[in-house]
Structures are given as C-alpha cells and as structure tokens.
Image: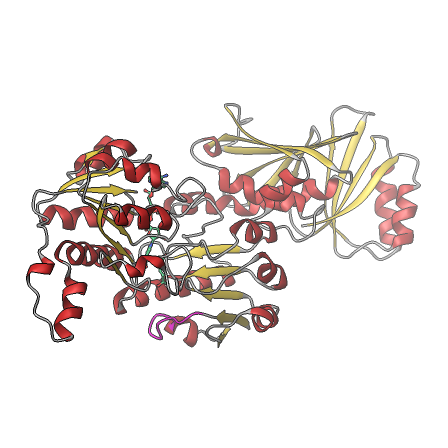
C-alpha cells in the first residue's frame, strides 16, 4: 500500500483516481508544517502540494520512502529540486492544467487596471459617485509587452490581439516562426521594455529573472506605463515598483503574486494605483480539477513503475521515444547489472556504445538506465533520477557514443567500465524471438541469455578444466542449467558462464578459486 500525503488544498474530483486506487492510502493533512510535516513525510511514498507547502531539503531527506513530489500547478519554486534530485525523488508538476485560467486572470487584471474597476467598485459601495476620478484608458491600439512567451504568455497574446492590442514579446527561446504564428512582434528585452503601454511578466522565477524589472529598467519605460505580474513575486523588484509609482513613471500596477506571500501590510497597498489579488491566477474550478487530475495520474504511474511525462528533474521523454526504446530496457539493465557485478574496484569511466538500429535517434534514457544498473552495485540509494548526479559527484566520467559497426547484428550495444587497474566490457543484442543476449564478455565471444544465477569463471583453457568444475559442483548437489565457454585461442585465456540452480556455499567457492587453472570466480545475479 502506498501512502500519498496531501498537504495543500486540492480538488476532490481531481484526486478521485487516487482516492479510488486500491493500492493507495490518501492522507490529507492540509497546512502541515514543521515537526508534524517531518513526522508524516517519514512514511509517505508520495507528497502532493500546491504552492503553500515548503518542501525543503530537510523535508525531502526525512522522506525515507519518498519516491515522488507532485506539484499541482506549474511553479516548483516551493520545492528544493536539487535536494530531491540528490535523494533520487522524482518531482512532477502539472504544467498545462492552469494555463487558460491564469491567462484569463491576467487579462481580467489588465482590463481592471486600464479601467480602475477595483478602485471604482470600492467607492460605489461606500456611497460615493465619483465618475471623474476613474477615467481609464482603452486597450485598443495600445502596446502590450509580454516578457516570457511560454504557455501563459502566448495564451494572453491571443486575448490581447482580440482586443486589437499591438503585442510584442521578449523571450530568449522565442523563434521568429512562433512569433509570426501568434501574430506578435519578437523583440529584445530593451525594445519590449521601451515600447510597452502595458508590460506583463510571464517567466519563471530564476536567478536570471529575480528583479529583472528593477529601478534601472523602470527608467527605460514609457511615462505612464502600467505593469502586471501574475507569474511570480520577485520578478519585479517591489521597492523599485513602489518608487516608480510614487514618481509618476508608472500609472498603475496589477499584482497577483508577491515576493513574500501572504504579503501582510505591504507599502504598495498604500498606493491607489495598485490593484491586487491573493495569488488567484490558477484558482478556478476547472484549473484546480485539471492540475489535480494530472498530478494524481502522474503519481499513480510513478508509484506503479509505469511511464510518466512531466518530471521536472528528469529530461522529458516523448511517448513515441518511450515506445521505441521500451524493447531495449531489459537488455540495457541486464548488461549494466552484469558489468556492474564484474567490476569490484572503484569505477573511473563508463562508456556505452550503440550501433545498428540503436544508433538511430535519442538513446539518452537508455544510458541513464544503464548507469543506474551498473552503479547500483557500487553506490547506495541510486535510481533513474539521481544516477547521473551521483556518477558526477563521484568523479565517474560517463560517455555515450554511437558506432557505425554493429558486428552483423540488427542492434548492438557495448558497455565498457574502467577502473584504475582494470577494464571490463560486455556486449549484447536483442535476438528476434529470443530476447536479450550477451554476445561478448571482455573480448570473449559468447551467447548467454542474461538471466538467473550465473557463475562467471575466468580460467586457462586446458583439457579437463570444465569437467573438474562440473564434478565439483555436482558433488555438492549444484545443478548446472546451461553452460557457455568462450576463448580467443586454444590453450589461452578463457571464460565459463554457468547458470546454476542455487547459490554456491562459501567453502565451495573457495575450492573453485583454489583450482590451478582458475584465475577468478564470481557469482552474478541477473
Ligand atoms: N498566478 C498564478 O496563479 C500562476 C499560475 C500558473 C503559472 N504561474 C506562473 O506563471 C509563469 C509562467 O508560466 P508558464 O506556464 O507560462 O511557463 P512556461 O514555462 O510555459 O513559460 C515561461 C517562459 O519564460 C521564458 N523565460 C525564461 N527565462 C526568461 C527570461 N530571462 N526572460 C524572458 N523569458 C524567459 C521561457 O523561455 C518560457 O517560454 C511561471 O512563473 C508560473 O509559475 C502563475
Ligand atoms: O496552487 C496555486 O494556486 C498556484 C498555482 C500557480 O502559481 C502555479 O505555479 O501553477
């Protein structure tokens, strides 16, 4: 039974799949913080949050069973992603579910800002009828500068175009083609800042975007500009905004988000030009249901070991690629486990080479999978998420390469592991109808089905050696299911791979190692 802990309010309909899952126990403790959160997370397999719960390194490290943190929404700035990655915990979000709601909210703020609707409303309900104080401006033919042209920025552009605004956009990843598709003008940051009658930010909050709208930037804006932030508090420097409004540079500001939330008695609230909402961008019935459905499904997939799509700390793998690579998973894992167990010293370098059909297209997910398999015999708590990070942390150099030489096979792959003193390599393929095969071990051609309990023996090729090993095992009632021998030349170095029905007792292992012709013996479990 998986324990799924929910600590922020989520739509009931949205988490219906989790509530109905027979293998899941849902524990809803809204607003959990401090010691209480640490104690609950200790036994949780998954944590579901919105933006309120602060998922710190301490919280993540306390989750000894934690496999996934799911953010019902887009922004993951309340989650310590590097800490989750180090711990091998997958972080997923729901990037699409609240796009429309947030774009619509931003548009509502835009109109409210242009026409002073919140301020006017307040006076009317207080018994005043002051029409002169609230003369607004039209949106028609005004320039809207959108900083950050992703999901929300581009949806907002469509709405602004419908109101006949000139839309210009700055986004380092915006192509001319995409700009044309949305009928917007692609601009540099400075151009967008200088041209906007309204300027709205829709970037994530990052090191680069924190205070990207600051004193200096306000100085470059048109007089009477109106500013919106429905993305993240901190993208706009609130002190600079306050000064720019007081100086008359900025005619008004609409804010849904704040550097500190809740913002308390903020100086900006003393200014009549400022309108605000309490982080309501995604607060619609539809958005909350969408994001809760999305993350509930992702959590179930991850807990059940099924494919998932919106991991924040893993490169996303398109469904088509997942499907294409799925047949190779077993081969890659088995080869990785084989060479990982063969290697008994500290690993310095791992090279994986793909050839044949495998050399066509993206194989990065296979490399990550192989890395996890190899290193699981050397490092604790390694998984698909943290494998590259742990390898790098240990100074293990990982190389992925493609080769035009597939050795006569439709697909071929080789894993080579180097240590200070040794190097080992294993090659494999998928045989139509027979599944994964190991076809070479350390330059010795073999044909081994990589499964079960194997005995891997390196020895000198001499008459009687194989017989003596068989007799010794037989004398201790150890049955040999299959056997493969590989050698490069008669009388030289050779290997034996025996699939045996049970593990070898310690004294028998020693007896094998003491045989004259044997150099090394190891058991390999696949
Ligand atoms: N107010 C709310 O309730 C609410 C709801 C949803 C999302 N959000 C926030 O809105 C923001 C946008 O969300 P989205 O779904 O559109 O994200 P997105 O990832 O689709 O778009 C963000 C865009 O910002 C661009 N960008 C990154 N760095 C930039 C920079 N330095 N300058 C200019 N552009 C830059 C990216 O290229 C990307 O296109 C996020 O901060 C998100 O957390 C707020
Ligand atoms: O949970 C919320 O309502 C905030 C949503 C929003 O800020 C997001 O990043 O998705």
What secondary structure is the magenta-colored segment mainly?
loop
- On screen, residue 87 above or below 371: below
- On screen, residue 451 above or below 403: below
Q: Is residue 32 left or right of residue 128?
A: right
Q: Position of residue 447 (x, y in %)?
A: 64, 38
Question: At 69% from the left edge and 51% from the top edge, which residue is drawn?
Answer: 380
Residue 272: quarter of image: bottom left
Is residue 12 found inside the magenta-colored segment of the image? yes
- Quarter holding the N terminus is bottom right
State the residue in front, 47 or 228: 228
Q: Position of residue 98 (x, y in %)?
A: 29, 59
State the residue in front, 140 or 328: 140
Total numbered circles = 0
Residue 225: quarter of image: top left
Is residue 374 found inside the magenta-colored segment of the image? no
Residue 274: quarter of image: bottom left
> Visible in this render: residue 361?
yes
Question: At 40% from the left edge and 64% from the top edge, which residue is drawn?
Answer: 262
Question: At 72% from the left edge and 45% from the top edge, which residue is drawn?
Answer: 378
Q: Position of residue 362 (x, y in %)?
A: 44, 36
- On screen, residue 56 above or below 497: below
Q: Position of residue 489 (x, y in %)?
A: 76, 23
Q: Is residue 119 left or right of residue 67?
A: left
Q: Is residue 270 left or right of residue 1?
A: left
Question: At 47% from the left edge and 65% from the top edge, which residue is drawn?
Answer: 53
Q: Which residues are magenta?
A: 8-15
């Amino acid at each position: 039974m998986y324990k799924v802990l929910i600590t922020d309010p989520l739509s009931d309909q949205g988490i219906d799949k989790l509530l109905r899952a027979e293998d899941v126990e849902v524990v809803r403790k809204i607003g959990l913080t401090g010691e209480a959160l640490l104690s609950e997370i200790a036994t949780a397999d998954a944590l579901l949050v919105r933006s309120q719960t602060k998922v710190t390194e301490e919280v993540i490290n306390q989750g000894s069973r934690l496999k996934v943190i799911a953010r019902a929404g887009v922004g993951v700035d309340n989650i310590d992603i590097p800490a989750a990655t180090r711990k091998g915990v997958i972080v997923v979000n729901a990037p699409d579910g609240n796009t429309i709601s947030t774009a619509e909210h931003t548009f509502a703020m835009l109109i409210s800002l242009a026409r002073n609707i919140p301020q006017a409303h307040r006076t009317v309900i207080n018994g005043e009828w002051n029409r002169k104080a609230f003369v607004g401006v039209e949106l028609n033919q005004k320039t809207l500068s959108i900083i950050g042209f992703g999901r929300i920025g581009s949806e907002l552009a469509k709405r602004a175009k419908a109101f006949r605004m000139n839309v210009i956009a700055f986004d380092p990843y915006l192509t001319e083609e995409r700009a044309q598709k949305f009928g917007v003008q692609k601009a540099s940051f400075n151009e967008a800042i200088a041209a906007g009658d309204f300027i709205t930010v829709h970037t994530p909050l990052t090191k680069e975007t924190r205070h990207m709208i600051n004193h200096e930037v306000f100085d470059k804006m048109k007089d009477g500009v109106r500013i919106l932030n429905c993305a993240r508090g901190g993208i706009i420097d609130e002190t600079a905004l306050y000064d720019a409004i007081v100086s008359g540079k900025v005619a008004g500001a609409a804010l849904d988000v704040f550097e500190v939330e809740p913002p308390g008695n903020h100086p900006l609230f003393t200014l009549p030009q400022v309108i605000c909402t309490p982080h309501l961008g995604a607060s619609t019935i539809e958005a909350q249901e969408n994001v809760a459905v999305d993350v509930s499904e992702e959590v179930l997939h991850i807990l059940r070991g099924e494919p998932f799509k919106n991991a924040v700390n893993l490169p996303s793998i398109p469904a088509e690629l997942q499907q294409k690579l799925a047949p190779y998973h077993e081969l890659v894992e088995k080869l990785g486990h084989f060479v990982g167990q063969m290697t008994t010293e500290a690993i310095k370098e791992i090279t994986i080479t793909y050839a044949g059909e495998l050399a066509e297209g993206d194989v990065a997910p296979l490399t990550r999978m192989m890395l996890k398999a190899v290193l699981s015999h050397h490092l604790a708590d390694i998984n698909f998420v943290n494998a590259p990070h742990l390898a790098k942390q240990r100074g293990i150099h990982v190389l992925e390469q493609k080769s035009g030489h597939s050795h006569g096979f439709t697909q071929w792959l080789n894993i080579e592991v180097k240590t200070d003193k040794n190097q080992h390599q294993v090659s494999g393929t998928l045989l139509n109808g027979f599944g994964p095969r190991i076809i070479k071990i350390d330059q010795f051609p073999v044909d081994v089905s990589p499964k079960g309990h194997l005995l891997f023996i390196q020895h000198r090729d001499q008459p009687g050696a194989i017989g003596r090993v068989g007799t010794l095992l037989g004398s201790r009632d150890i049955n040999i299911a299959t056997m493969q021998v590989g050698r490069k030349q008669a009388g030289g170095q050779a290997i034996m791979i025996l699939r045996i029905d049970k593990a070898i007792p310690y004294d028998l292992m020693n007896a094998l190692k003491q045989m004259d012709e044997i150099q090394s013996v190891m058991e390999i479990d696949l």
